[in-house]
Image: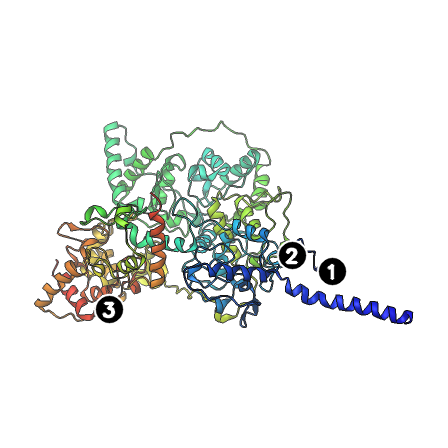
């Protein structure tokens, strides 16, 4: 009766630790954090991908290799996000400024447009998540 | 001490033990374990994270009448530092909506008041709204967002588009969806040959992979009877008659024939049929595949149809080209020689079943063909399938899962049903649409968003009422005849394949517009669909151009631009050096090729439009990727003055 509601010590976690089963079950239900195209994208990478395809892929290419169909016309060429040397040492804050204020905002070529008028900060961060996912896929 | 006292003592002890059960239960709560584990986790982090107080945490959303206790265990929801932590401590992805304002179960479903793992996750017994699996989460967006393009919900938008285009409302009543136009079947007996019809009814996608017609999985006998039944309808609609081909078509010499076909090929290219029709997999998506049309329809019908499309297929969105009779005959000759199905195998002659008409009619009624296809002989379509307006609120116990082993939840039922409609019951009549896994998920998401929950009106985002602008008069007749609104939007009505014409005369200069009808050159490099040449007469072009110049204007786009020479060089500097417009636009052959070349923009566009477009592209064409450089008025004027010098 009353004691059956409090099912014995075997199934109740001791105060202090969650039961191993429940944590393990929760963990295996989540997909691991991923890089683009290899494993499923997280929510933020997914949103970033949509924005990337619309605004960026024309010059930077659909895989971010700097080989979009407009890249032929540009000098300097658009950055290749899959090239570790091109992306070495660039912080997220720099990426965000580049996206929002264009190339001239980081003292680079004005050929990179400023997207701050078309995207807000959160959308810019989504794009950065996707760019970082592209970086990890060679 | 008496026996009574002993009993009293025993009962008191029992009472004390019983009373201790309640505080003991509370001491050993599952969620307390998670909270202690969380505090242990954040103590080891380099960042500073506020430890959680031990106790139940809840979000009470009064307006939505929900209490969500998820945060009791999911403590790291708002902590950036925990982006990579293991569940249940991982932070929530950044989304538009505030968790405090909406709670958790509004989007995720599930039993919000639960504080134990077993009571929250998965198929909780007797809880009507179980937690939505991640793949279907956008269905919750659709509960409030009823507009056409819900931001940040691509799966939902795709699903709603699929439900609309697949014409589900032909059999299922769903509020908010309209029936699509489908070719009527009157006169089909004088249009197609029997072999084609039999192959089509067996498997529509084999002829045209992009068809919206599903596969009804009919038996061979049923297909034969249905085909024979349909082919009895030889009279074209509207009491019309098929005009015979002109005598110029009856040529004997091979050389002359080749000449005619070559002429037809040139005209076919100018007419840009490929802008709407697929031709061997390439082209527009608005109309059907033409790559094998010569093996489907006979030449007489094809000639008559192109001559007067709306007579032979009422309400079709095909424009009427102003071909001369001989020109049209050469186009038809070209199509008959080119668009042949080389794998076509004529079926052996077939004697119809003596009762083919009744049997065919029975099949026609059984599968509700009239729900999509109009056929004058068969009146009244019934909606065969269940009403799906509130299907998102269907309870799990109301669903019959048959002999299948799918997950017994509503999302998986809907997805499986859409993918393979006859798995749950072999007697089901729903046809197979041939969707991919992603498409079926998207369609299920769209249907799941039709919930039966009582959501307060202030939360719901409704689509703006679609204005229904049908132009009148001479202009209106031409617009209907040329089906302009199947590619252009005018004052809110039409399809946006090409540009929105509602302010066209404030954007483009009137003389350019008229010249464009004569030679519709391609303005933007990356498009498949291009404006066809309808071979209009001078007076027709004047009717169109004059109406547009008088009506499709927006006064606020007028702006007097100063004629200041100094601004030209300022504008040039802004163009090349500050904003780098040459990355997407060409001038003098140099630059990028994303937007239209600007060599002659001064004689094409109105200066007022250039000014306003540069100031706020999103307001006029949100689908374009023109940057908004937050220009000052002076910068926009300088750029406008510079651009108008390019003629």
Residue B557, label in figure: 3
Q: Viewer-proximal residue, B571 or B162?
A: B571
Can residue B497 be seen from the camera position used here?
Answer: no
- What residue is shown at x 42% (from left), y 64% (from top)? B48
Which chain's residue wears label 2? Answer: A
Give the left or right position of residue B643, taking residue B261 as reference: left
Q: Quadrant of the N terminus of chain A?
A: bottom right
Q: Are marks 2 and 1 in contact (CB under 8 Å)?
A: no
Q: Viewer-proximal residue, B296 or A17?
A: A17
Q: Viewer-proximal residue, B498 or B445?
A: B445
Q: Is residue B389 above or below residue B248?
A: below
- What residue is shown at x 54% (from left), y 35% (from top)? B224
**C-alpha span from label 3 to label 2:** 71 Å
- Residue B18's spot in the image, x, y percent? 75, 66
Image quarter for residue B120?
bottom right
Instruction: Identify the residue at the far right of this view.
Output: B2
Q: Are marks 3 and 2 in contact (CB under 8 Å)?
A: no
Q: Is residue B355 above or below residue B117?
A: above
Instruction: Identify the residue at the far left of this view.
Output: B565
Dot 1 lies on which element? helix
- Residue B248's spot in the image, x, y percent? 27, 36
Dot 3 lies on which element? helix
Which chain's residue wears label 1? Answer: A
Give the left or right position of residue B415, taking residue B209 as reference: right
Identify the residue position indicated by label 1 in the image: A3
**C-alpha span from label 2 to label 1:** 13 Å
Identify the residue position indicated by label 2 in the image: A12
Confirm whether circles 3 and 1 share one chain.
no
- What residue is shown at x 18% (from left), y 50% (from top)? A76
Can residue B230 be seen from the camera position used here?
Answer: yes
């Amino acid at each position: 009766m009353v004691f059956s509601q409090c099912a014995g010590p075997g199934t109740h976690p001791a105060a202090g630790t969650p039961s191993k089963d429940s944590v393990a079950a929760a963990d295996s239900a989540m997909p691991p954090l991923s890089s683009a195209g290899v494993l499923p994208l997280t929510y933020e990478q997914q949103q970033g991908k949509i924005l990337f395809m619309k605004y960026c892929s024309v010059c930077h290419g659909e895989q971010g290799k700097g080989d979009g169909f407009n890249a032929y016309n540009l000098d300097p060429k658009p950055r290749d996000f899959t090239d570790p040397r091109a992306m070495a040492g660039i912080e997220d804050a720099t990426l965000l400024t580049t996206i929002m204020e264009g190339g001239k905002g980081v003292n680079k070529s004005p050929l990179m447009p400023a997207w701050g008028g078309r995207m807000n900060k959160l959308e810019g961060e989504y794009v950065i998540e996707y760019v970082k996912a592209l970086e990890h896929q060679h | 001490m008496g026996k009574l006292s002993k009993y009293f003592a025993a009962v008191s002890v029992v009472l004390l033990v019983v009373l201790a059960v309640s505080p003991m239960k509370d001491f050993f709560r599952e969620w307390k374990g998670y909270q202690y584990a969380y505090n242990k986790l954040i103590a080891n982090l380099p960042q500073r994270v506020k430890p959680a107080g031990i106790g139940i945490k809840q979000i009470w959303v009064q307006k939505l009448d929900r209490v969500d206790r998820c945060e009791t265990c999911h403590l790291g929801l708002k902590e950036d530092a925990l982006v990579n932590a293991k569940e249940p401590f991982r932070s929530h992805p950044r989304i538009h909506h505030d968790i405090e304002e909406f709670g958790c179960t509004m989007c995720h479903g599930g039993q919000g008041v639960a504080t134990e793992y077993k009571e929250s996750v998965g198929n909780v017994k007797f809880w009507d709204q179980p937690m939505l699996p991640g793949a279907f989460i956008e269905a919750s967006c659709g509960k409030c967002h009823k507009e056409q393009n819900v931001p940040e919900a691509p799966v939902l938008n795709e699903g709603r588009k699929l439900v609309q285009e697949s014409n589900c409302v032909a059999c299922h009543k769903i509020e908010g969806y309209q029936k699509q136009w489908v070719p009527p079947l009157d006169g089909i007996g004088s249009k197609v040959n029997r072999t084609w019809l039999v192959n089509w009814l067996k498997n529509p996608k084999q002829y045209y992979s992009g068809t919206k017609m599903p596969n009804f999985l009919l038996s061979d006998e049923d297909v034969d009877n249905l085909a024979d039944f349909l082919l009895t309808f030889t009279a074209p609609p509207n009491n019309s008659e098929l005009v015979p081909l002109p005598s110029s078509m009856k040529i004997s010499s091979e050389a002359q024939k080749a000449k005619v076909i070559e002429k037809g090929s040139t005209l076919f290219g100018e007419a840009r049929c490929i802008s709407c029709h697929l031709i061997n997999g390439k082209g527009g998506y608005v109309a059907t595949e033409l790559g094998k049309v010569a093996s489907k329809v006979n030449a007489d019908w094809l000639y008559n149809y192109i001559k007067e499309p709306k007579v032979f297929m009422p309400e079709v969105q095909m424009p009427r080209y102003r071909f001369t009779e001989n020109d049209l005959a050469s186009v038809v000759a070209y199509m008959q020689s080119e668009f042949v199905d080389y794998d076509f195998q004529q079926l052996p002659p077939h004697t119809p079943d003596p009762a083919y008409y009744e049997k065919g009619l029975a099949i026609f009624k059984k599968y509700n063909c009239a729900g999509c296809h109009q056929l004058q002989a068969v009146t009244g379509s019934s909606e065969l399938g269940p009403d799906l307006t509130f299907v998102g609120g269907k309870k799990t116990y109301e669903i019959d899962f048959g002999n299948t082993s799918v997950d017994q939840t509503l999302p998986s039922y809907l997805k499986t049903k859409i993918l393979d409609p006859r798995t749950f019951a072999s007697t089901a009549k729903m046809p197979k649409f041939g969707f991919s896994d992603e498409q079926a998920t998207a369609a299920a998401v769209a249907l799941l968003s039709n919930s039966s929950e009582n959501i307060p009106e202030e939360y719901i985002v409704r689509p703006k009422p679609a204005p229904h602008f049908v132009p009148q008069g001479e202009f209106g007749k031409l617009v209907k005849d040329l089906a302009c609104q199947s590619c252009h939007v005018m004052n809110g009505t039409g399809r946006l394949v090409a540009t929105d014409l509602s302010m066209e005369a404030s954007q483009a200069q009137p003389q350019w517009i008229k010249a464009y009808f004569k030679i519709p050159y391609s303005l933007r490099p990356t498009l498949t669909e291009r404006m066809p040449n309808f071979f209009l007469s001078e007076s027709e072009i004047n009717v169109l151009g004059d109406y547009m110049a008088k009506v499709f204007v927006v006064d606020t786009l007028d702006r007097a631009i100063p004629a200041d020479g100094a601004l030209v060089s300022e504008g040039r500097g802004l163009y090349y050096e500050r904003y780098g417009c040459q990355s997407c636009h060409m001038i003098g052959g140099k630059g990028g090729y994303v937007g239209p070349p600007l060599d002659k923009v001064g004689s094409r566009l109105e200066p007022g439009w250039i000014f306003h477009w540069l100031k706020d592209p999103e307001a006029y064409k949100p689908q374009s990727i023109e940057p908004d450089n937050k220009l000052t008025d002076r910068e926009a004027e300088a750029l406008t003055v510079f651009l108008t010098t390019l003629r």
